[in-house]
Amino acid sequence: MRTWQFFLVSLVIALAGFMGARLLQNDYLFFAGYVVLQFIVLATAWNILGGYCGYVNFGSAAFFAMGAYTTVVMTKLPAFANRHFPEEIAALVGIPPIPVLILLGGVIAGLVGLGTGYLTLRLRGVFFAIATLALAVVLQTLIVNWDFVGGSRGAYVIRPATAPLFGINYIEYLFLVMLVLVVVALTTARAIERSRLGYGFATIRDDELAAEASGVPTLKLKLVATTLSGAFMGMAGAPFPYYIGFLEPSSAFGLAYAVNAIAMPMIGGTTSWVGPLLGAVLLGTLQQLATVTISSAVSLLLVGLLLVFFVIIAPNGLLGLWHDYFGRKHKTEDESKTAAVKTS
Amino acid sequence: MDFPVELLINALIAGILLGGFYAAVTVGISISFGILDIVNIAHPAFIILGSYIAYILNQRLGLDPILVSILVLPFFYYLGSLVYQVYYLSFEKRGQEALRGLAFFFGLLFVTEVVLILVFGVDYRYVQAGYIDTTLRFSFLDLPMRMVVPFVISMILVLGLQLFLSKTFTGRAIMAVAQDQLALSLMAADPIRIKRIAFSISIATAAIAGALLIIIQPVEPSVGREYIGRVFAICVLGGMGSLPGTLIAALLLGIVESITSTFYGPSWAPAVAFGFLLITLAVRPSGILGR
């Protein structure tokens, strides 16, 4: 299937799902569904760098929060302009619609990704992982000390009373926006897999030194992956203030995002775009159920335990298990081939 | 306005005391990450675990937190060998430590934190001991005992480990495994066993660091995260696995953080470590005393 065909087909499936969900007349479905969709985008974004290139990003929460706080800044701008600029200019400043906010959040988070990558990606992969871990702490410190976006007290973001699209309420609108973002993210991930870019990423993952020696521009490719991955995480975060209504640093930078962004692709399988989708749908739904029936701390514990369990027992995730179970014949052929290569 | 010299000297001394404590927090990482090349990002979680054990025994039995940490050393040592065994069999042996090994330790960090939250809640916990509330004063200089005691213990710990690594057979074998694993096995020493011992020691230091942490400040489960940036910054800056380097880097970071929080406010302190880390990685990734 060509990329644009895939895009159209998944868009149609997504819209059909949306219409089907509307028939149930249940707002909670959209509230819970939004979180699952958000995790699909986060997991797919993480996998572009982590699964395809083999570089671990522990700072997903930081990129997510960058997107969310970009939105907060934009919603605070009109009031700020009213206070400090003459009326004619202030009248021009308004709150942009959500799709524009998503693009802005993507650009900011992408730039943060590019900067972090540029400083640390020339070294061993481990240093990048550690730097992303520390990045989350530092960006949180900056936000806590920045009064304009509410500092550590947090910021209210008032959700408009009506949605810009006719006939649906606001939570359905947010859900729809996130649904389109999911389709865009999955299409991008799938397109990368089948392009020169994707093969370049795979060479980095399998043997970076050999790739470098054969003329693959590894640093450039890694920077592309970090920027893309960061940008999608920021996009996932941009509508979040409207969803939650009140954003504070400790919720935007919550470790839960970082853990989920890693656990979902790891559990689903990192080599294909299906893995993060599968992992996010399963884990996201499981967490929603566990949060409602038990408690949110227990649902997080579940994710952590599943992550540890899967990396030890099933290193290639659910997709790997599937291939092991149904593709055994295929696999043994592959193994005999590699064995033949090794002996020759 | 006169430059507040007395304030500066106080900040300097406080920074040195703080830096000494950071050295105790980092030696474990210097051994596991610096020498063995095991990226144990769960180390701060083990430190918090140490803090909570010190807290429980201090509350229930009134034991001194440092005494508790020495009593639980064997327990942490065996916990370390257990973790290393799982890590070795699941990742190192299969050559998958880069991606999945990291995810494994991240999972451990997260699980430990959530379990502590489930058991103890998110309230701050602290310990009681005779020396915690006293402060020595020399004219304008303040020396709070809750900083001095951890500093002294930490110096003993770093010095002891350095002697162990440079003088004993096992210690030298640990240094050797970092350089050439094959050569070590040719000398009839099992590199896996040596690595397991070294990793267990690194986790054992977390028990002591944890007790020191809860003497210095009240602890809640997510405090450990603030230390991830710090310990790795110190470890990299110190030159990966060099204990003297670790000590120098720790003192440096302690002083800079203390001066930052004295003159600009404590809410900026966490950003200092990250700045340190980024500058080190960008300018001199082999650290101060790097090989």
Image (cartoon, coloured by chain):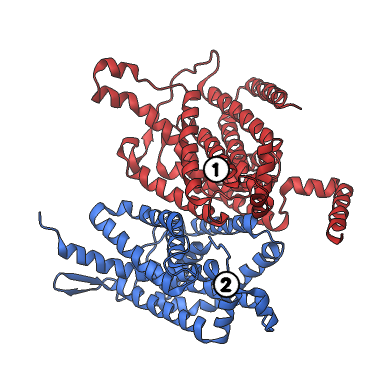
Chain colours: A red, B blue
Q: Is residue B153 left or right of residue A199?
A: left
- List the single residue furthest toward the bottom: B168
Q: Residue B199 carries which label?
A: 2
Q: Is mark 1 on a helix, strand or loop?
A: helix
Which image quarter is the N terminus of chain A in? top right
Q: Is residue B128 left or right of residue B82?
A: left
Crowd class of label 1 (few under 14; some 14 to 19; many from 20; radius 10 Å)? many
Q: What element carries label 2?
A: helix
* Measured Cα–Cα span from mark 2 to mark 1: 34 Å
- Estimate the x, y position of residue B162 in percent, counting from the top left: 46, 80
**Front-most of B85 and A135?**
A135
Select label 2 or label 1 by which is in front.
Answer: 1
- List the single residue furthest toward the left: B1
Crowd class of label 2 (few under 14; some 14 to 19; many from 20; radius 10 Å)? many
Q: In this view, does B54 lie to the left or right of B266?
A: right
Which residue in the structure is indicated by mark 1?
A223
Q: Which residue is drawn at 45% across and 53% down?
A: A134
The kind of residue on which mark 1 rests is: Leu
Q: Which residue is drawn at 85% across and 46% down?
A: A327
